[in-house]
Amino acid sequence: MNVSEILKTEAIKYDLCSDWTNDWGTPSLEELVDKYIKGLDFCILNNYPSNEFIKKNFGKIAEGKGVFVDSNVNLLNPKIAILNGSCSGEIVLNNYVSRDIHVRHDSIVKIIIRDGAIAFIRVYDNAHVVVENESGSRCFVYKKGGRVTISGDVLVRG
């Protein structure tokens, strides 16, 4: 089986809905990463696919789309950032961008928001996120687990 067939078979075991199953098609590796991002809630709920599977089969393709596993990140205004495994580093949002950031597993990251940016940060598992709002920017943290350390105007919701 190829990567797509393996992922589809595994997703069906986790009760992938019929719409997603019927529309699966024959996606490329890039399109599979897009499916992961679009179906992130399902993937997080089922811890699917495994971090090892992502690293082995998607590597730089995933990173190019904002999906990281066990990586050191230094990002400026990423379209999206999904940090899995034991990621570490810093993410800066500025210049009026609005971004989603997901920090999972054992990742530790500092996120700096400034100059009118808007951040929607979701924290899971044992992750630790340090959030600094340096200006009148808007920042919302949705804590599903882990630890959050804040500085400045940050709204944290459980």
Image (cartoon, rainbow, N blue to C red):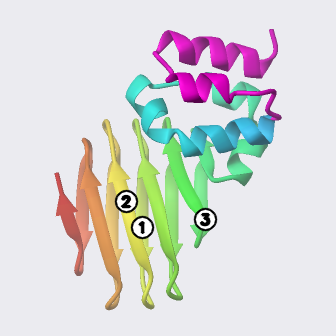
Is 7 covered by the magenta stretch? yes
Q: Quadrant of residue 25?
A: top right
Of pointers 3 and 2, the one earlier in the residue sequence: 3
Residue 103 locus on image (x, y percent): 42, 48
Residue 50 visible within the image: no
Of pointers 1 and 3, the one earlier in the residue sequence: 3
In front of the other: 58 or 40: 40
At numbered mark 1, what does the secondary structure look like: helix, strand or loop?
strand
At numbered mark 2, what does the secondary structure look like: helix, strand or loop?
strand
In front of the other: 17 or 102: 17
Residue 131 locus on image (x, y percent): 33, 67
Of pointers 1 and 2, the one earlier in the residue sequence: 1
Q: Which residue is mark 1?
A: 111
Q: Which residue is mark 2?
A: 121
**Amino acid type of the residue that numbered disc 1 sits on in the rendered structure:** Ile
- Give the magenta-colored segment's residue range: 1-28
Callout 1–callout 2 Cβ contact below 8 Å = yes
Left of 78 or right of it: where is 153?
left
Q: Residues within 10 Å of mark 1 (few under 14, many from 20)?
A: some
Q: Which residue is mark 3?
A: 79
Mark 1 vs mark 2, foreground winner is 2
For the residues marked 3 and 2, what is the alpha-carbon distance in whole angstroms?
Answer: 13 Å
In front of the other: 100 or 145: 100
**Amino acid type of the residue that numbered disc 3 sits on in the rendered structure:** Lys
At numbered mark 3, what does the secondary structure look like: helix, strand or loop?
loop
Is 151 covered by the magenta stretch? no
For the residues marked 1 and 2, what is the alpha-carbon distance in whole angstroms?
Answer: 9 Å
